[in-house]
Image (spheres, grey):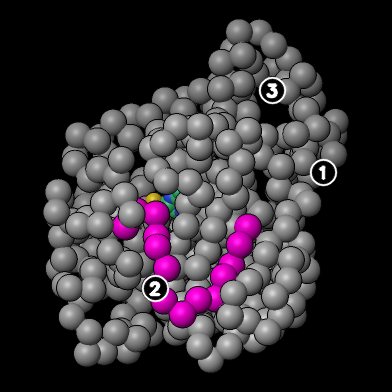
Amino acid sequence: MHGGTDRESNRRRRDIRQLKTAKGGIRVLIKKSADIRSNEITPKEVYLNRRRFMAAAGTAGAALVAGKYLRNLITPELLAQAGTRLEYTRSDLSTQGEKLTPLDDITTYNNFYEFGTDKEDPSRNAGGLKTAPWTITIEGLVKRRASFDVDSIVKMHPSLEERIYRLRCVEAWSMVIPWVGIPLSSVIKTVEPASKARFVAFETLYDPKQMPGQRRSVLQWPYVEGLRMDEAMHPLTILAVGLYGESLPNQDGAPIRLVVPWKYGFKSIKSIVKIKFVEKQPPTTWNIMAPQEYGFYSNVNPEVDHPRWSQAKERRIGEFFKRSTLMFNGYGDQVAGLYAGMDLRKNF
Ligand SMILES: Nc1nc2c(c(=O)[nH]1)N[C@H]1C(S)=C(S)[C@@H](COP(=O)(O)O)O[C@H]1N2
Ligand SMILES: [Mo]
């Protein structure tokens, strides 16, 4: 469940510290057992992504400490999910002047209920998700209904862009993440939606074999989300395929996820398999779960509290003191116009 109490965030911080300790242990062990720089004995990609391996290895940390060898951990599954370096350009739409949240936090403190409800569950359990080949179906009120491989969707756009954005979870924590992706608008333009299409609906993969969290009914599966067409077309809205210059770690929504920086994090749906253009406002997972707590819009708004906690402040992961939450997560200059004349308390 989403929860925003202090006790809960304290527990989460403790979890992160424990994980970091475990991972530090792994690093020491690598040096000792190899006694030679790992870039001399491993392929470049593996070397570059050693830290990601550690995140992916997750509970394997315990196995290592118990005396197993790293060699046994480099399975084809882990190799397949190692981040690939991406070519990208910087973007003027990136958020300026914010310290980036460290990769370790971005990849070990996650919400991805398909892999468990604790923050460290996705990094432990998402390693086996097969992200290639990956098909996305585009359907509904659109000229070019089709199934595409994720790579061809990305190729519809001339180049990948880095977009540094704040991410504000409805649980009152936040991060600053350097995403790599494409504007959603560019995909939408290519497939030519009909004028009757007023909303875009998104769907995550449903595969309980690969997504153990889906074997329990914590949420209604598959996870679904939606945007109004003008929100989907907004230049800040992206489909991310990477972060920190490499392809997305599974726990962050590989191979492709939505990022809508002025809305609470749960709108940014992960591991998307379907994009559908529709006339009516589509159902969304957390709204189905608790409609009085999570609205369709879910724009970050420090003045509209969650029924069970305040949204006035947030804890930036890695910082001790809380900071004030900004209207539209600080993107008001760009997006406030989308909601002109709307009652943001009613349309929360
Ligand atoms: N399919 C799916 N997408 C999801 C979620 C989820 O549980 N399942 N969690 C959401 C929530 S609550 C947040 S805060 C962000 C977290 O993204 P991150 O783990 O990459 O930081 O993903 C969102 N997208
Ligand atoms: Mo969230």
Q: Which residue is drawn at 16% across and 72% down?
A: 345
Task: Check contact, mark 2 vs mark 1: CB within 8 A.
Answer: no
What is the secondary structure assignment of the residue under circle 1? Answer: helix
Give the label, 2 or 3, closer to the camera: 2
Q: Is residue 281 above or below residue 143?
A: above
Q: Mark 3 points at which residue?
A: 30
* Region of the chain picked out in magenta, as a range: 273-287
Q: Is residue 113 a member of the stretch shown in magenta?
A: no
Q: Which residue is drawn at 19% across and 40% down?
A: 6
Give the label, 2 or 1, closer to the camera: 2
Q: Residue at x 71, y 42 (%)?
A: 130
Q: In this view, does 50 lie above or below 180?
A: above
Q: What residue type is labelled 1?
A: Lys
Residue 8 seen in the current view: yes
Residue 131 point in image, percent of width and height:
71, 48
**Quarter in which the N terminus is drawn:** top left
Seen from the viewer's position, the closer of residues 242 and 44 is: 242
Tell me the CA gap for discs 1 and 3. 16 Å
Tell me: 222 left or right of 256: left
Which circle's residue, 2 or 3, is located before the other in the chain? 3
Seen from the viewer's position, the closer of residues 145 and 24 is: 145
Q: Which amino acid does label 3 sit on?
A: Ile
Q: Name the residue under label 2.
A: 281
Which circle's residue, 1 or 3, is located before the other in the chain? 3
Seen from the viewer's position, the closer of residues 123 and 34 is: 123
Task: Check contact, mark 2 vs mark 3: CB within 8 A.
Answer: no
Residue 100 seen in the current view: no
Residue 147 point in image, percent of width and height:
74, 66
